Image (cartoon, rainbow, N blue to C red):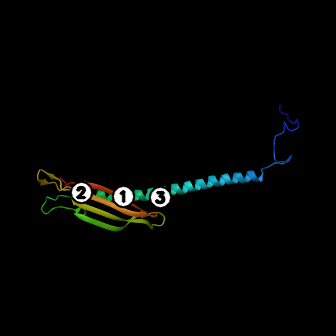
Amino acid sequence: MELEHPAYASQPVSCRRAGQRGFTLVEILITAGIITVVGATALYALTMINKYAANARVQAAAAAIVQYHIDQILTRGPYAPTNVPPDIPTILTAGTTTTNNIPVFVDPENGNVLVSGTLTTTIQDSGATYKTSPLYVLKAAVSLNYTFAGKSFTVAMDTLRAPDQ
C-alpha cells in the first residue's frame, strides 16, 4: 500500500518559483549547443559540396581539352597516306608530342590561370592490314595530367584514324 501526500499529488514538479517566466540558463546553454552543432555540420557540408563542385568543374574542363584534341585528330585532313606525295596533316605525324602549361581552368572573374597541365599526344601506326596490304590506320592517345588541390589527375582518351576515302 502506497501513501501519497495529498498536497503534492496534483502539483507538477518544477525548479522555478511561483510566478517566474522564461528559460533557465541550462535550457539556453543546451539550445545554444544544439544550434552550434547543427550550424557546424551545415558549414562542413557546404564546404565539401563546394570542394566537389570545384573538382568537377576542373575535371570537365580537362575532359573538354582532351576531347578537342581527339576531335582535331579525327577531323584534320585530308589524310591520304597513299597519295604521291602523301597528304598527312601535321597533327597526325607519328611520335609523341608533349605540351606543358596548358591552361586547364581559368578564373572567370579575373582571367587568372588557376590550374594548368601537361598535354601528351602519341600517334602511332596500328599495324592493321588487309591480307598483306597496310591499312594506314593510326592509333592516337591523348592525355592531360594536372594537379588540383594537392592531388594529381589524368584525363586520357584514345582513338583510331583511318585514311580519308
SS category of the residue bearing label 1: strand
Residue pointed to by mark 2: 139
C-alpha gap between disc 2 and disc 1: 17 Å
Q: Are marks 3 and 2 in contact (CB under 8 Å)?
A: no
Residue pointed to by mark 1: 155
- Type of amino acid at the residue the image marks with label 3: Ala
Position of residue 140 measured from the top left corner of the image (x, y, whole percent):
26, 58
Q: Quadrant for residue 126, please give it.
A: bottom left
Residue found at x 48% / y 56%: 52
The nearer-to-camera label among 3 and 1 is 1
Residue found at x 32% / y 67%: 99
- Between residue 126 and residue 110, name the one nearer to us: 126
- Between residue 72 and residue 129, name the one nearer to us: 129
Check the picture and name the quadrant holding the N terminus.
top right
Q: Quadrant for residue 95, please give it.
A: bottom left
- Type of amino acid at the residue the image marks with label 2: Lys
First in sequence: mark 3 vs mark 1: 3
First in sequence: mark 2 vs mark 1: 2
Q: Are marks 3 and 1 in contact (CB under 8 Å)?
A: no
C-alpha gap between disc 3 and disc 2: 33 Å
Circle 2 packing at 10 Å, graded few (<14), some (14-19), many (20+), is some
Position of residue 74 measured from the top left corner of the image (x, y, whole percent):
26, 56
SS category of the residue bearing label 3: helix
SS category of the residue bearing label 2: strand
Residue pointed to by mark 3: 54
Q: Is residue 33 above or below residue 95?
A: above
C-alpha gap between disc 3 and disc 1: 16 Å
- Between residue 137 and residue 20, name the one nearer to us: 20
- Type of amino acid at the residue the image marks with label 1: Val
